[in-house]
Image (cartoon, rainbow, N blue to C red):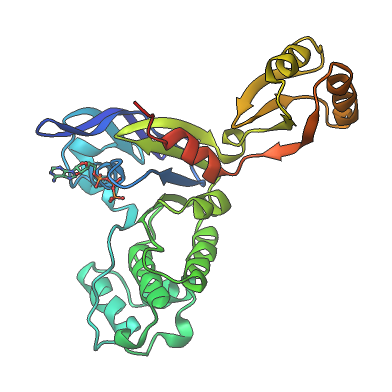
């Protein structure tokens, strides 16, 4: 099937400010896609364009195959979104709040109970909204987005303001939402959340996508070699070793690709070449380290 969301050079300017700069996104059916970026990177503006709420300055966006500038209404029939803290009547129960929304949308009451079950609120559905925890309020917001059985769900910072237990509830919920062909577009600045929940991710910085791909492929794995001084000599030895490749410097160490069972050989080679070795170990960056690295402001 075609991409669930596809953008082509999508751009939004506010006056002189370029909020979103020629982004090309591709979100595939059934995946949980993470949209990651520091504050002000342009995430909310992008969601606004994908929902037809903000008019792009240039470029195009397709949601579920619909050109969002011309066919937003048709697309939105199949999209559920929670883009800010949801507003509900505090004195009504969660269930009655959903019934109000369902009736306004011409949906049967049965959908209310199904949506409550999907977010695991059946047992508390008759309690007043004002008595809900923050996590329950967010879950009710997601239930509201699910009422019309959307194929695509867009969540903007769904764990904002939640304690760790509430964040975990939402993470589990997001996982359970994907599947049966449903796609989730998750906007978050919480990296561990994206790393744990998403299969693919795009990282936005100052309106530009600076990385996009499988979470796994954005992590750098390898062997970390830290020497005590003698960096040039160490690098020369590494470069002349045929089974060592992709040598990069990583902080005060080298990160290389090398067979996992040859760390002892590496140690022997460096030591024989007069390079004292502080450590050699297998290494994997977390998405968080990767994110900090790719979004770090360069010193001028
Ligand atoms: N209506 C507007 N008018 C002018 N500038 C705007 C408008 N909306 C957003 N911007 C600017 O566009 C840039 C991107 O903002 P946006 O809210 O999309 O970022 P974000 O990644 O969602 O950040 P946050 O996580 O803080 O919400 C920012 O520099 C912001 O100041």
For residue 61, side relative to residue 29 (left or right): left
Residue located 40% across and 85% down the image: 125
Residue located 44% across and 37% down the image: 202
For residue 94, side relative to residue 196 (left or right): left
For residue 18, side relative to residue 79 (left or right): left
Is 160 rendered above or below residue 135?
above
Q: Quadrant of ligand 1?
A: top left
Is 257 rendered above or below residue 171?
above
Between residues 170 and 126, which one lies in front from this camera angle?
Answer: 170
Q: Please identify the quadrant where the C terminus is shown.
A: top left
Residue located 9% across and 33% down the image: 15
Q: In the rendered image, is residue 85 in sight? A: yes
Q: Which quadrant of the figure has residue 255?
A: top right
Between residues 199 and 193, which one lies in front from this camera angle?
Answer: 193
Residue located 38% across and 43% down the image: 37
Between residues 14 and 254, which one lies in front from this camera angle?
Answer: 254
Q: In the rendered image, is residue 28 in sight? A: no
Q: Position of residue 193 (x, y in %)?
A: 51, 55
């Amino acid at each position: 099937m075609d991409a669930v969301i596809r953008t082509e050079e999508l751009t939004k300017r506010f006056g002189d400010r370029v909020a979103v700069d020629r982004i090309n996104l591709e979100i595939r059916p059934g995946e949980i896609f993470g949209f990651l970026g520091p504050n002000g990177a342009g995430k909310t503006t992008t969601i606004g364009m994908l929902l037809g709420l903000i008019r792009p300055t240039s470029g195009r966006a397709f949601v579920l195959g619909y050109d969002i500038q011309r066919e937003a209404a048709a697309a939105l029939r199949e999209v559920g979104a929670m883009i800010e803290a949801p507003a509900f009547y505090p004195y009504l129960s969660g269930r009655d709040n959903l019934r109000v929304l369902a009736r306004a949308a011409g949906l049967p009451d049965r959908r209310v109970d199904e949506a409550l079950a999907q977010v695991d609120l059946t047992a508390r559905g008759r309690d007043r909204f004002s008595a809900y925890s923050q996590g329950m309020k967010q879950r009710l917001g997601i239930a509201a987005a699910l009422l019309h059985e959307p194929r695509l769900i867009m969540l903007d910072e769904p764990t904002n303001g939640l304690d760790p237990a509430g964040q975990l509830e939402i993470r589990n919920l997001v996982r359970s939402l994907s599947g049966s062909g449903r796609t989730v577009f998750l906007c978050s600045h919480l990296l561990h959340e994206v790393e744990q929940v998403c299969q693919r991710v795009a990282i936005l910085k100052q309106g530009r996508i600076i990385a996009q791909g499988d979470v796994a492929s954005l992590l750098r794995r390898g062997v970390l070699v830290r020497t005590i001084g003698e960096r040039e000599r160490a690098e020369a030895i590494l470069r002349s070793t045929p089974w060592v490749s992709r040598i990069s410097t990583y902080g005060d160490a080298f990160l290389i690709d090398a067979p996992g069972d040859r760390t002892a050989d590496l140690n022997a080679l460096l030591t024989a070449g007069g390079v004292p070795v502080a450590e050699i170990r297998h290494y994997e960056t977390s998405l968080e380290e990767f994110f900090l690295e790719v979004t770090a402001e360069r010193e001028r």
